[in-house]
Image (cartoon, coloured by chain):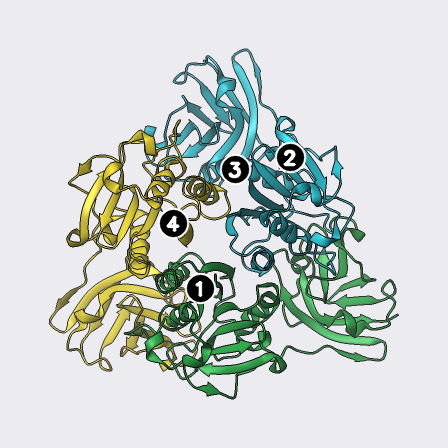
Chain colours: A cyan, B green, C yellow
């Protein structure tokens, strides 16, 4: 039984996501549908790409991920299906799929041009319904990606900002702020290398945090703490509170970690 | 395998929707459950009716739609099931189901009175749980609508406001504002008839938009654009932004489209 | 086919809930997944416990409920599975599961220590993904709870505040405020005993409400009304409005009901 997972900036107030699911179930009955998120900020392709990349590895092999954060809908950007070693990614070719599809894991990229697998007529404003949902249904029903259109050999790619280590200092930035107000930085645990975890010092705006803890309860409620989080990145949090509110920091702001 | 789709004003913070799904799965194991929206504004029957009407045509034939926006719960309004040519609609008879059930598509309306298909005892405040969910489960399990109570021959009906054309001028209004701040008007594409698409002029408050585009990218980011949207209506949008915020307009405000 | 229901404070913006579902479907394909709520306020264990307790009785027997409101994640609190007469509850042993597991209904409590059923390596910040989801999957796939770790004989318990009756006066408090602004008190209908329903007087801050109605439409739109709600508690509501906004009351504030 096929699994189709959805990641969009559609919100859940309007019927858009439900309509996509209706189209999928009408064409591929019995499909298991899962929501990854419909709370990507409107048109925030980079955040959508990050969320999708974090989610994909945890799903069953061959899960079909439909992702729609698509400010160029109806325009020149291509609709594509990216087949990787473990998933099928369907969406606009605007970078949204790229973080979940590192080049070494891509098997092929297909330009979704075969009209037989799309709805007709097609709106110029809702390709989630008219293009991506019916293509996901075709894949769920067993159609090979290669039948959906011609193979192409390029894919629009986003790059995460890379944290840089210079001697005893790592310079990174805030990558993502979650619902709890935890701030994920772009500093991977392995970038810290031989830094003694208890000795490092993390600075974000006016906040300075001593050490990297293994869980939030290393500090008292209301205090700042740095941890390596479930995505493998250094995260700045407030125990039982919001680091975003406490520090006032936003995505993109510089973070500095000193090794001693 | 039956599909039950849910449209309510219950939000997703409280356990109300989960409880309805629990009741359905307890009585009709294996049912596929889909959320259309639980973000209908509280007691906004007309918005719920519009959302439901937009969603129903995209679902598999014979999908069971449970809709609950029910300010009169526990009072005199009837609980009903409307069987149409392509769906079963279950909810309060307060107009909520009517836009999805135009008269020419209605096969029958059943008043849900048979106690065997309802929970007992029944609260006076949550018929989603006590009436509509168990009825949906009965339908999902194969019970014909005709067994759920007596057939009745009236249905509370809402009417969408109709846009009127007078020579070269169409007068309509804002019908719906979505999550992106796009403003759907009640002007259908076919009402524009022979107006040259590039020549029309759309006025909403202080905003005046030239032409009707086929997608948002006809204008630069941040600019107003009028399109025919995926529902077939003229929509006023801001590319990569919110027309609701830019124009300050709300549902019900007048829109004027001139043919030259 | 197993049913797994989820109750968390994760929100639906981030991919956390989707990742948990991916883990479950990867290990127990075909599982039916249902959301109870992901809108528990962050770290609000008592509200999560109440929501879970309200939801459990309406689900099919042997539903697996995964609940994660877990401020102590990665710390000393135990991960547990509570097997009751009608459900399997999986989550942190911080009181969250306790209101859904009254002592007389508990069959056993298992400390989730068997590494074979957990992900490895395990983060210190996301046991929803690394502990509770894979355990739910194991249960969904038919693993008996007794194989997941050693049985223990204590469970962290929360107590709901109890309303007290003293002659003709019941003193309680606001227990829960829902999405509509309806205020559920901790006064159960049976605590009112022989009070004549039309004669009681309910006081909350400056508001005084005469009688207990059987549904909201006993009063005019915009007026305050007291009802016995679907959870069996006295609720203070505003018809077609929000009692929370009208009265300005919050969870924990005292409510007084007089019998004459």
Q: Is residue A120 visible?
A: yes
Q: Position of residue A200 (x, y in %)?
A: 44, 18
**Are discs 2 and 4 less than 8 Å apart at CB?**
no
Q: Nearer the viewer, mark 1 or mark 2?
A: 2
Q: Quadrant of residue A93?
A: top right
- Same chain letter for marks 3 and 4: no
Of circles 3 and 4, the one toward us is: 3
Question: At which x and y percent is residue C197?
Answer: 23, 80
The nearer-to-camera label among 2 and 3 is 3
Residue at numbered disc 1: B10
Residue with the mark numbered 4? C6
Q: Quadrant of residue C237?
A: bottom left
Which percent across, then down, holds residue B203?
A: 77, 67
The answer to whether the residue labelled 3 contacts the one labelled 4, judged by CB atoms less than 8 Å apart, is: no
Neighbours of disc 1 within 10 Å: few (<14), some (14-19), many (20+) = many
Return the mark for residue A61: 3
């Amino acid at each position: 039984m096929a699994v189709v997972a959805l990641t969009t900036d559609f919100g859940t107030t309007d019927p858009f996501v439900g309509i996509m699911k209706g189209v999928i179930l009408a064409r591929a009955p019995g499909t298991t549908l899962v929501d990854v998120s419909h709370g990507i900020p409107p048109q925030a392709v980079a955040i959508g790409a990050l969320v999708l990349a974090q989610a994909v590895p945890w799903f069953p092999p061959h899960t079909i991920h439909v992702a729609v954060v698509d400010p160029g809908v109806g325009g020149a950007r291509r609709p594509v299906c990216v087949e990787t070693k473990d998933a099928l990614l369907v969406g606009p070719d605007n970078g949204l799929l790229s973080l979940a599809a590192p080049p070494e894991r891509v098997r092929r990229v297909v330009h979704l041009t075969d009209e037989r697998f799309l709805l007709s007529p097609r709106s110029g404003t809702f390709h989630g319904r008219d293009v991506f949902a019916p293509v996901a249904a075709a894949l769920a029903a067993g159609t090979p990606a290669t039948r959906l259109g011609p193979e192409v050999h390029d894919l629009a790619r986003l790059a995460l900002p890379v944290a840089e280590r210079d001697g005893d200092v790592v310079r990174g930035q805030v990558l993502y702020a979650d619902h709890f107000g935890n701030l994920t930085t772009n500093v991977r645990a392995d970038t810290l290398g031989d830094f003694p975890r208890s000795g490092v010092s993390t600075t974000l705006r006016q906040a300075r945090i001593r050490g990297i803890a293994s869980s939030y309860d290393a500090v008292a409620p209301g205090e700042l703490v740095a941890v390596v989080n479930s995505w493998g990145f250094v995260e700045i949090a407030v125990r039982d509170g919001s680091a975003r509110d406490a520090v006032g920091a936003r995505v993109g702001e510089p973070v500095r970690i000193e090794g001693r």
